[in-house]
Image (cartoon, grey):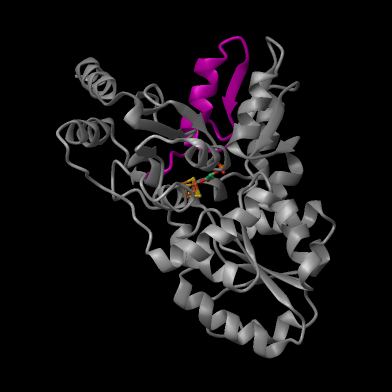
Amino acid sequence: GEEDRARRIDAALEELGDDVVVLGHNYQRREIVEHADFVGDSYQLSKQAAESDAEYVIFAGVTFMAESADIITDDDQTVILPSMEASCPMAGMAEALQVDAAWAEITAETDADVVPITYMNSYADLKAFCAEQGGLVCTSSNAEQAFEYALDRGEKVLFMPDKHLGENTAHAMGLEDETVEWDPWDPDSKAANKVVENDIILWEGDCQVHERFRVEHIEAVREEYPDASVIVHPECRRGVVEAADEAGSTADITRAVEEADPGETWAIGTEIHLTNHLQRWHPDVNVVPLCGDSCMDCNAMRQIDPNYLAWVLEELVEGRERNVIEVDPEEKELAALALDRMLSI
Ligand code: 13P
Ligand code: SF4
């Protein structure tokens, strides 16, 4: 049962002591975050990984996060992802080969300097590509600064893979009239005939969990709770972000509820596990999921079953390293540069 498994995890952690640190993303289930040394958003966790000197970093999150941890940590540190199936579908929407082809097309059609930015939710090879082209990585908590960095150094931005984060950021910075969506899957959609007069080019990628939220959900929640504050993740559609009171990373959402006065109502537009954690952690605040019963969990995050956490830890106790995430050394150096640029802004 659950208690038994929790005891096994605790026993293994005790045995391993300072050799391991467990990082848990805000979207992980309760049975995972309860065992984490740090719980946070993808930016905070990448900083925790960089600062930790534990020999093993157990990353309870998705592949791209574990890869970033491997890139940022020292060579003698090992990153372990409890399930190799935990891959964010959005990260898979901008494959490096595809981006290479798009890049050739875009740069052939314009004399302007284009600077690529990739959202943290992407694989190491795309991060490496961005570094090579003078670009960088961003997360939902520093996208505006990344756009500023890019526009200081070039005239146009190619933003991948999340079109909504890109559009929401451009809009917040007053650049919305200059954005264009480009569908790399559509053979008729040539970047070439659009890019010339547009400064922000958005890759056609999105997150299924956040796409679901609609303005009608916000209207319904305001009708039911007239005093509610609405906060959503910037991976939501532009109309949803505009209709909400606030938008921010999972750390911003967490902070909003932490700082709420008792009795306040906060409607949360993000992955359902975080919403549930927030209600559990702050019982005096009324935390409601923005789309009621139809809010989704993230299928990739859900792959981290507590049984797998127990397994990788018990294997480590026995001296066996399972599910190690190791980025190719060549990619690693460049991807590190793209991440360092982000950490420096
Ligand atoms: P955060 O960077 O806000 O933690 O978000 C990560 C993510 O995957 C959102 O869907
Ligand atoms: Fe990827 Fe969306 Fe899951 Fe975040 S919530 S890991 S963006 S699929």
When asked about the image quadrant of residue 167, the answer is bottom right
- Residue 229 visible? The answer is yes
User: In x, y percent, where is residue 195?
Assistant: 72, 80
- Whether 247 is among the magenta residues is no
Q: Where does the image place residue 159, in percent across and percent down from the top left?
A: 64, 65
**x, y percent for residue 37:** 43, 25
Q: Classify residue 244 by image quadrant.
A: top right
Residue at the farthest right position: 174
Residue visible at 73% across and 36% down? 246
**Quadrant in the rendering for residue 205:** bottom right
282 or 82, nearer to the observer: 82
Foreground of the two, 68 or 220: 68
The N terminus lies in which quarter of the figure? top left
Bounds of the magenta segment? 270-299
Q: Is residue 186 visible?
A: no
Please state if 230 lies on the left or on the right of 274 as rendered: right
Number of callouts = 0
Classify residue 28 as left or right of residue 44: left
**Where is residue 160 shown, x and y percent of the image?**
59, 64
Q: Residue at x 45, y 61 (%)?
A: 332
142 sits left or right of 171 in the view: left
Depicted 263 relative to depicted 289: above or below: above
**Residue ID at (78%, 55%):** 171
| Image vertical order of residue 206 relative to residue 57, above or below | below
Q: Residue furthest bottom?
A: 108
Q: Residue at x 19, y 30 (%)?
A: 317
275 magenta-colored: yes
